[in-house]
Image (cartoon, rainbow, N blue to C red):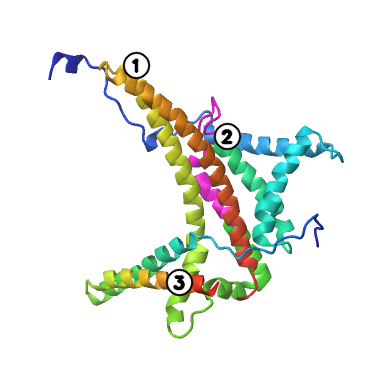
Amino acid sequence: MTIAGLVRAEEFTPPGPGDFELPALFGGVDKPMLQLVLAALLVVGFFWVASRRGELVPGKLQFAGEQAYTFVRNGIARDIIGSRDFMMFVPYLVALFFFILVNNFFGLVPLIQFPSFSRASFAYGLAALTWVLYNGVGIRRHGLLGYLKHQSVPAGVSGPILALIIPLEFISNILVRPFTLALRLFANMFAGHLLLILFTLGGEYLLLTSDVAFYKPVGVVAFLLAIAISFLELLVQFLQAYVFTLLTAMYVSGALAEEH
Amino acid sequence: MSQSGPFTEPPASRSQDPWVAFGRLVAGVGIYGLCGWLLDRWLGTSFLLPVGIVAGAVLGLYLVFVSVRER
């Protein structure tokens, strides 16, 4: 060990899952919980204000609200579920999409900068809602036994192999789905946020704390990369909200479909 | 309930969640791996767990092929 090695400031500790455990602010309520409430208020507030004066020639705000609503109504609900049944599910899908979108964007909003759904339990909660919805409408459409048959007996398989396929299809359609749905949202938000704090904290360490002169320009590069990754995250955050809503619509559509 | 639009509405697309393939593989490996493991414990053997895992993966893949062919 050289003298320089002894003088060197504290070691860099890379960020990890522990950075997602935020301390309670008051009475067991922490920041992500408040973010969920804030996101709900923002979404409800936006659509309420945008639709308050339903004018024939819309103003800017009403136009924005209508565009946002139409995007989910036509682009997701009607295209996937079909024009016969889709209107019933539009309120849920619109609320779901914009709730997830706002919560994901919180990952980049200054001073908030934490994507709510990087906490896995929130994502599981949303997936549970979708699970109840698509199984519920499926059972209502086909009856309990009819629905189980609909989801467990695949078309185009016959003979003794069917006995092996049925439990597999049941598990894949009823039990595994909510987990893949939640995991995709959670893991994307978690990984994106981890990447951002790694580049930011690493850049800060290299630039300010480390005393090797060569590291300082590398720290600047790390900051530049953090900005670049922020733009990538913007895309991922939108995409994950879209995918979650799209898959919810697909599950509903699959549960409602007539016998193959 | 017909929503009359300015253009004819497209029929529901028959697209399917691409992740269903993943779910089927996981389900196949999980359930038949579990069956193999339980049989191993019951019979005191040790070769049925890998057999179950491979059989489950094969069944999951087969199911994916069938569902793509049927569409």
Q: Position of residue A200 (x, y in %)?
A: 40, 26
Residue type, label 1: Leu
Name the foreground residue: B66 vs B48: B66
Q: Disc 3 sits on a residue from what chain?
A: B
- Quarter the C terminus of chain A occupies: bottom right
| Front residue (pair A259, B48) | A259
Residue A134: quarter of image: bottom right
Give coordinates of residue A58: x percent, y percent. 82, 37
Host chain of mark 2 = A
Answer left or right for A79 relative to B67. Answer: right
| Magenta stretch bounds | A106-130
**Residue at the disc numbered 1:** A208
Element at label 2 = helix
- Pointer 1 or 2: first along the chain: 2
Q: Is B70 above or below relative to A25? A: below
Does the magenta segment cover residue A95? no
Q: Is residue A116 shown above or below A10?
A: below
Q: Secondary structure at mark 1?
A: helix
Marks 1 and 2, Cα distance to the nearest angstrom?
32 Å
The residue positioned 60% from the left and 60% from the top of the image is A250
At horizontal 72% and vertical 62% (from top left) the residue drawn is A85
User: Mark 1, mark 3: which one is toward the viewer?
Assistant: 3
Q: CA distance from mark 1 to mark 3?
A: 56 Å
Question: Quadrant location of residue B59?
Answer: bottom left
Q: Which circle marks residue B65 in the picture?
A: 3
Residue that carries the numbered disc 2 in the rendered image: A35
Q: Residue furthest front?
A: B7
Near mark 2 (Cα within 10 A), the count class, few <14, some 14-19 or many ≥20, is: some
Question: Which chain is indicated by disc 1?
Answer: A
